[in-house]
Image (tube, grey):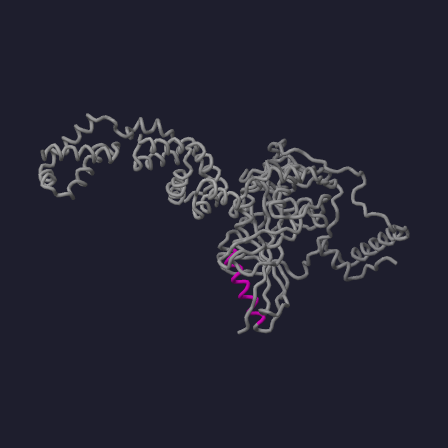
Amino acid sequence: MAKIIDDETMENVCLLAKLSLEGEEREAARAEMQKMLTYVEKLDQLDTEGTEPLSHIFGSENVFREDEIVNGNQKDAMLFHAPRTKDGQYHVPKTIG
Amino acid sequence: MKQYETVIGLEVHIELATKTKIFCGCSTEFGGEPNTHTCPVCAGMPGALPVLNRQVVEFALKAGIAANCQINQLCRFDRKNYFYPDNPQNYQISQLYLPVCHDGWIEIETSAGKKKIRIHEMHMEEDAGKLIHDEWEDCSLVDYNRSGVPLIEIVSEPDMRSAEEVISYLDKLRCMMQYLGVSDCKLQEGSMRADVNLSVCEAGSGVWGTRTEMKNLNSFKAITRAIEAERERQIELLEMGKPVIQETRRWDDNKESSRAMRSKEDARDYRYFPDPDLPPVHISDEWIQRIRNTQPELREEKQQRYQDELGLSDYDARVLTESAHLAALFEKTAELSQNPKKTAAWFMGEVLRLIKEYGTEPEKVCFSPKHLARLICMVEEKKVSPANAKKVFEHIFDEDTDPEAFVREHGLGIVQDADLLQRVLQKVLAENPGPLSELLGGKEKVFGFFVGQMMRELKGTASPEAVREALMEEIKKNRR
């Protein structure tokens, strides 16, 4: 049986994801997450006894680049997508100093 | 009052001296205009793919091997998830499950003697961007130049018991990294940063207290002050019967106090998982062996060799090896001058004196060893007096002047011209008839006066011996 997403779990998930969900919105999100968990629960039916945990599927290793500067100043292109900038920097809401 | 013991462990972040960032080809240079060293990878654009800089693994291995660590020959990167504007991906690429190095130790020395501090692990990770507060608009501004700069985090076991031990440990790490060429370890520029985990317990109880983590420590002095203050704060709480809360605190060096940084509800839950973008790193036996074979001579070995092979004192060897850069300059100069002891005397005397006088860092000293070596030889060959040599050296230190040309141009060479010496001698004697008769009358004190007068006339370009000799000759002549 999948873990039940209770109010406490919702509280914690919202906190970690920096989401403020209230009322119906919150209830809908909770129901959807519950569905996801139930869906993924199917995996538990597999017998994974003796199977090594897998983190990478391609089996490649030691993919390196050499320590050479290949990027120049692309400041304008980088900042172009930012909703707001100031003095060549990204303008964001105040963080605790 | 009860006796308390302080238990301290450190997390030290060291910026590696690579040319480029850990996962992209952007420059790591410090102090560039904001966001001029960024690209889609280090600015966390969706779909950008990180590729590991081989040099980062090399440096991490060098550091780990020097600190007697075990190597995880299969190591991996993990994502540490958190939301903060200095972290554009919303996760930091770090190592949790399989850090590159673990279980090492380094030896420190304090007034109480030598002690081993165990190292829990060393892992590779990327640095975050820099946030500055904009007073005018009451917002924050982000510069991602530092985002993706490679770091190693060195986590010690809680083996330290005092601020003195902590400083000794940091000093040792810094010196080691500088010798290895792995990092310049500048606390002011943030290329070495230490977080202090501290708890207190009743002496002898064996039951450890709750620890706090202290951040924002930018100098050895701040670290010492923060340790003392946090120890006092925790003891005070315990004495009042209040609990110490496990939390992260931020040190304010101006106020000489700290305050809690994160509120309780913002509990740390980083949901680490292996980063699927980065394939695992397999470190072969051959790779480790190659690193071992190419490790440079570290400070302790150098110190011993200076005593054994160059015949320097324990004290001189210790001072000369404090900075890896200065030690290298010294060795090159000693090799060129073929006179290690005289070279050591110049470094211990004039080089250190000028470093202190200018308030510069040993790492910034940049004269050519061949120039100082030549000057040392010129003194030995009596081509320049020791006093004038010191003046010449100031120019070598400042502008890397060629001593031979400088001495020639400024007429500082020792006068080999006997006629000139005679002319000056006769002039000085003629100008001072009073002292002359005293001298001839056998008043020895006046001898020094005449040597001084002649040296002044000759602007120090004569050897004092030659002047004394000429003067003695003259006295003998007059007495006959």
Q: Quadrant of residue B424?
A: top left
Residue B121 place in picture, x, y as percent: 65, 51
Can residue A80 be seen in this snapshot? no
Magenta residues?
A: B223-238
Left or right: B375, with B79 as reference point: left
Count every numbered label the image shows and give the total. 0
Question: Nearest the camera: B396 or B261?
Answer: B396
Q: Residue at x 64, y 44 (%)?
A: B126
Residue A42 place in picture, x, y as percent: 89, 51
Question: Nearest the camera: B74 or B97?
Answer: B74
Q: Quadrant of residue B209?
A: bottom right
For the stretch drawn in magenta, what is the main secondary structure?
A: helix
| Above or below B68: residue B28 | above
Residue B206 within the segment the image draws in magenta: no
Residue B194 place in picture, x, y as percent: 57, 52
Q: Residue at x 59, y 46 (%)?
A: B14
Q: Quadrant of residue A20?
A: bottom right
Can residue B282 be seen in this snapshot? yes
Residue B365 place in picture, x, y as percent: 44, 38
Q: Residue at x 79, y 42 (%)?
A: A56
Question: Nearest the camera: A53 or A41?
Answer: A53
